[in-house]
Image (cartoon, rainbow, N blue to C red):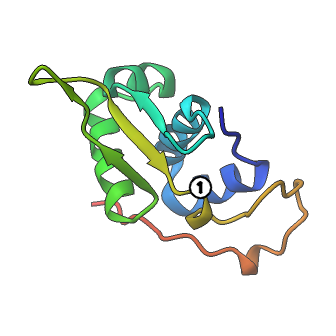
Amino acid sequence: MSELTYEMRRVLRRDVGPQAAAVIDVLAHYDTGDGTGAQITAHRLATESGLSEKTVRRVLSRLSEAGLVNYDNQFRDNRQLANRYYPQYDRIGGGQSDPPGGQDDRAIVVIAIQEE
């Protein structure tokens, strides 16, 4: 399990919105931290983030386009399994282990996802 810092969560909510932040937070919970990413279904992401499955799919697409989450489709015997997601923590502002209020907001840069 990978943990998002307080600052990373705050920046995500502010810069990409609460829905995207909720999805990345769930992905971080399921991320093994050993480089193999998080294998999880859109249904599970929806259940744990409190969003609809359609919203989760839309948010994942936007996060992927913004370079904040990479993914691989997983198949076995020509059947699709849960995708494997790789949150790009180094692209999320806030860095590593920043305490609340411990970093100047002007130094944080996150790719903003435009709401349509």
Q: Residue at x 33, y 21 (%)?
A: 43
| Percent coordinates x, y for residue 99 in the rendering | 89, 54
* Three-letter residue code for mark 1: Leu
Image: 104 above or below 23? below
Horizontal relation, residue 41 to residue 77: left or right: right
To which residue does mark 1 refer?
Answer: 12
Crowding at dot 1, Cα within 10 Å, few <14 / some 14-19 / many 20+, comes out as many
Q: Nearer the viewer, residue 1 or 11?
A: 1
| Percent coordinates x, y for residue 21 in the rendering | 54, 46
Image: 68 above or below 80? below
Count up the numbered dots.
1
* Residue 40 falls in image quadrant: top left
| Percent coordinates x, y for residue 69 in the rendering | 43, 53
The residue sitting at the left extreme is: 78
Q: Residue at x 37, y 37 (%)?
A: 84
Q: Secondary structure at mark 1?
A: helix
| Percent coordinates x, y for residue 112 in the rendering | 46, 68
Q: Residue at x 53, y 46 (%)?
A: 18
Q: Residue at x 51, y 36 (%)?
A: 27
